[in-house]
Image (spheres, grey):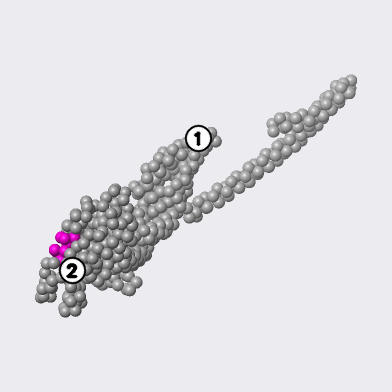
């Protein structure tokens, strides 16, 4: 600008100086008096022209400078508007914004930070953000964060922090370093969102799916209830939860899942009789209504357990009855706190939802268990005789096939016996079927007492039995066992005040000597039994 002004000055003053020289040279010969007058007039003319040029130059200069200042002011106003807009955006943002220096101490927080954490700006100004630490975030998260930030990189992740009132909450954070013109980090800016509701929904859904998964896999009820309790405690680390189940009589509470309560407390509570004043859970189970005790130390329901709760450091207990689909109380779901604590509306929703989930688990477990028992009963009916408990023909056939395969593989002998009771029909006709059934049960018991545990005794008909002997040395060894059975059954039976005597006929066939397949072996054992009957009964015959 100065250079331009200099040339402008020369442009305007040079013609005036040149004119002054010309006039002076032309009038050099004139008389001295008139020459002085002319020079004076010319001088003032030149000065006037110079001043006019200077004025024009200054006018142009100030015009240009004023325009530049106007532009700068306009730009400054635009920047101020941008800053004002940005400040308003940060101030009104639903996200929590924190600005910290290189020492990590807080320099600024926006109103959302105060709303979310409960801490005002003056309470955290100059303090480290670790005032929010709950101790539940893994140290690895912080190590990874600082590793990124110290290398000038941004970091994103999640924190589990604690509000000023002690509540735990989840945050999703994005933290970035701020650089100056020299590329040096001057401060850090963190933008954080409260994701507590989302995390709790996710964990509740996960817990629900986990319970259904355990149910589908046939997991034990205590494992399923433990999963419910742990899911709630994972969402709310400051809570301790328990599930107690009513016994079959519906008069006492038994421990279902209480992982975070002291063992001595659980042992004392297990088996507690329900009723008014039996703590929060005993009262809830008895009345079928929710019981909220905000201060255990002063509430009359806990008077009998004051010493126990003091030792366990329990300050509050909220208990919800667990109702089944038939509107029957199945147990209780309870939430404990170490200190005096009042529930908020979301806490009431939590305890209701947890009790409902526990009800689903308990009822479905019982339904699955009932189905399993029913299937087991039908399976047993198909494979075991209802009266004597001995295997039926179906199960015996399976065992015989397995025994024959084993005997073939190991080059061993086995014996198959067919046994038919003698004089059983007169007992039925004389004393009735009830006595006859008792006699059959006693016969089965005596036969089992004559064989090894590895052997099998089976009832295949009314008074017909089959015995499978594993690993017998020879026919004589099998015959000795048959004689032992026969003599045991020859002993008098005393039933219903009566003494009765029966005998038996036994046929014996050996594998592989008398047959190498099931059909042949059973046919030959049956033929040997009929030969024993034909020979006068009460005897054993080897095929």
Does residue 259 appear left or right of residue 154 in this picture?
Answer: left
Q: Residue at x 26, y 70 (%)?
A: 461
Q: Earlier in the sequence, mark 1 or mark 2?
A: 1
Q: Residue at x 64, y 41 (%)?
A: 69
Task: Give x and y (percent) for residue 319.
Answer: 28, 65
Can you say whether 501 is above or below 37 in the image?
below
**Whether residue 168 is visible:** yes
Q: Are marks 1 and 2 in contact (CB under 8 Å)?
A: no
**Whether residue 318 is visible:** no
From which residue to which does the magenta span run? Answer: 482-489
Q: Which residue is mark 2?
A: 536
Mark number displayed over residue 348: none
Dot 2: within a 10 Å radius of its alpha carbon, few (fewer than 14), some, or many (20 or more) residues? few
Check residue 484 for magenta coloring: yes
Q: Secondary structure at mark 2?
A: loop
Quarter holding the N terminus?
top right
Q: Hey, which quadrant is residue 76 in on the image?
A: top right
Dot 1: within a 10 Å radius of its alpha carbon, few (fewer than 14), some, or many (20 or more) residues? few
- Total labels: the figure holds 2
Q: Secondary structure at mark 1?
A: loop
Task: Give x and y (percent) for residue 270.
Answer: 21, 61
Q: Hey, which quadrant is residue 438 in on the image?
A: bottom left
Q: Residue at x 44, y 38 (%)?
A: 147
Q: CA gap, disc 1 to disc 2?
A: 114 Å
Mark number displayed over residue 184: 1
């Amino acid at each position: 600008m100065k250079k331009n002004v200099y040339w402008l000055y020369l442009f305007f003053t040079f013609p005036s100086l040149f004119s002054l020289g010309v006039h002076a040279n032309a009038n050099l010969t004139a008389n001295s008096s008139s020459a002085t007058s002319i020079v004076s007039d010319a001088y003032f003319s030149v000065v006037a022209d110079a001043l006019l040029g200077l004025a024009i130059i200054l006018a142009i200069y100030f015009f240009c400078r004023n325009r530049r200042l106007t532009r700068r002011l306009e730009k400054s106003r635009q920047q101020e508007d941008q800053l004002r807009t940005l400040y308003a955006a940060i101030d009104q943002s639903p996200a929590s914004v924190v600005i910290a220096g290189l020492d990590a101490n807080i320099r600024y927080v926006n109103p959302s930070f105060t709303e979310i954490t409960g801490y005002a700006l003056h309470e955290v100004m100059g303090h480290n953000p670790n005032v929010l630490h709950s101790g539940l975030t893994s140290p690895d998260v912080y190590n990874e964060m600082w590793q990124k930030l110290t290398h000038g990189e941004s970091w994103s992740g999640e924190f589990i922090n604690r509000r000023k009132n002690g509540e735990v909450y989840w945050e999703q954070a994005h933290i970035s370093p701020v650089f100056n013109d020299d590329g040096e980090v001057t401060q850090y800016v963190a933008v954080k969102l409260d994701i507590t509701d989302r995390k709790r929904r996710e964990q509740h859904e996960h817990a629900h799916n986990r319970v259904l998964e355990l149910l589908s896999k046939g997991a034990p009820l205590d494992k399923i209830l433990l999963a419910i309790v742990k899911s709630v405690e994972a969402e709310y680390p400051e809570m301790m939860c328990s599930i107690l189940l009513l016994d079959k009589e519906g008069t006492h509470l038994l421990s279902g899942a209480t992982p975070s309560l002291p063992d001595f407390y659980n042992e004392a509570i297990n088996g507690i009789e329900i009723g008014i004043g039996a703590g929060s859970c005993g009262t809830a189970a008895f009345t079928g209504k929710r019981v909220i005790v905000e201060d255990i130390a002063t509430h009359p329901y806990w008077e009998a357990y004051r010493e126990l709760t003091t030792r366990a450091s329990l300050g509050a207990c909220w208990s919800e009855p667990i109702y089944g689909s038939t509107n029957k109380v199945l147990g209780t779901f309870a939430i404990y706190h170490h200190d005096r604590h009042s529930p908020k509306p979301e806490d009431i929703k939590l305890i209701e939802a947890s009790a409902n989930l526990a009800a689903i688990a308990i009822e479905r477990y019982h339904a699955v268990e009932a189905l399993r028992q029913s299937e087991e009963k039908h399976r047993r009916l198909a494979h075991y005789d209802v009266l004597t408990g001995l295997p039926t023909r179906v199960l015996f056939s399976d065992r015989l096939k397995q025994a024959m395969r084993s005997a073939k593989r190991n080059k061993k002998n086995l014996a198959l016996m067919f046994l038919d009771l003698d004089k059983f029909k007169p007992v039925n006709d004389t004393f009735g079927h009830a006595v006859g059934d008792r006699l059959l049960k006693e016969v089965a018991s005596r036969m089992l007492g004559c064989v090894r545990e590895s052997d099998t005794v089976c009832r295949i008909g009314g008074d017909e039995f089959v015995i499978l002997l594993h690993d017998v040395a020879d026919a004589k060894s099998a015959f000795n066992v048959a004689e032992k059975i026969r003599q045991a059954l020859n002993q008098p039976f005393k039933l219903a005040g009566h003494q009765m005597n029966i005998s038996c006929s036994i046929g014996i066939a050996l594998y592989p000597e008398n047959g190498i397949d099931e059909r042949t072996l059973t046919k030959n054992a049956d033929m040997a039994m009929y030969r024993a009957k034909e020979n006068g009964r009460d005897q054993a015959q080897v095929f």
